[in-house]
Image (cartoon, helix red, strand yellow):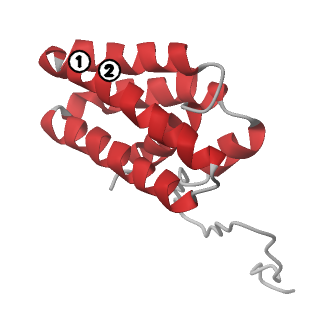
Amino acid sequence: MDAVVMAAGSALVAAMATDAWQQVREHTVALWRRIRPEQAEQVDGDLETLRTQMLQARHSHDLDTEQSLEGVWRLQLQALLQREPVAADELRRLLDDHLAPALDSSERTQVYSVLQNTTVHGGSSTVAGRDVYGESSAPKE
């Protein structure tokens, strides 16, 4: 599954429990209106239903349900991109401009932790989620 889809699905579900939810919902439905307008009203209704489930899960500290809801929206977003691959840039903008800003800093960090890209030309690279210790590979003189 695409990293942006995973991050956007997680951010969307987390945003359901925020004060910014109405704006997030409007921007998410607007994405569908541009790309798959025939599905926009259904998505709008699904989002509201799932928000109720999300709030109940948060209230009862039901992490399994929260994770399941993330999975549902990751699949929805993945299906959208499979049908309309050109929507990937719009999904990334939705994530960066509306979903992630609705979250607190710890949730935002968690969402973006799945988005890591490294390109190395003519050298070496180390990517880690924590501290890395090692010796330089530079030749000793």
Horizontal relation, residue 89 to residue 137: left or right: left
Location of mark 2 (residue): 44
- Residue situated furthest bottom in the rendering: 140
On screen, 137 above or below 68? below
Alpha-carbon neighbours of circle 2 within 10 Å: few (<14), some, or many (≥20)?
some
Alpha-carbon neighbours of circle 1 within 10 Å: few (<14), some, or many (≥20)?
some
Q: Residue at x 22, y 35 (%)?
A: 80
Horizontal relation, residue 108 to residue 91: left or right: right
**Amino acid type, callout 2:** Asp
| Mark 1 touches mark 2? (CB < 8 Å) | yes
Disc 1, SS: helix
Q: Nearer the viewer, residue 2 or 15?
A: 15
Q: Nearer the viewer, residue 11 or 52?
A: 52
**Residue 60: mark in rendering:** none
The answer to whether residue 112 shows anywhere in this view is no
Location of mark 1 (residue): 40
Q: Residue 90: percent from the left, percent from the top?
A: 37, 24
Q: Residue at x 17, y 21 (%)?
A: 36
Residue 18's quadrant in the figure?
Answer: top right
Instruction: Look at the image and tell me in which quarter the N terminus lies.
Output: bottom left
Horizontal relation, residue 10 to residue 77: left or right: right
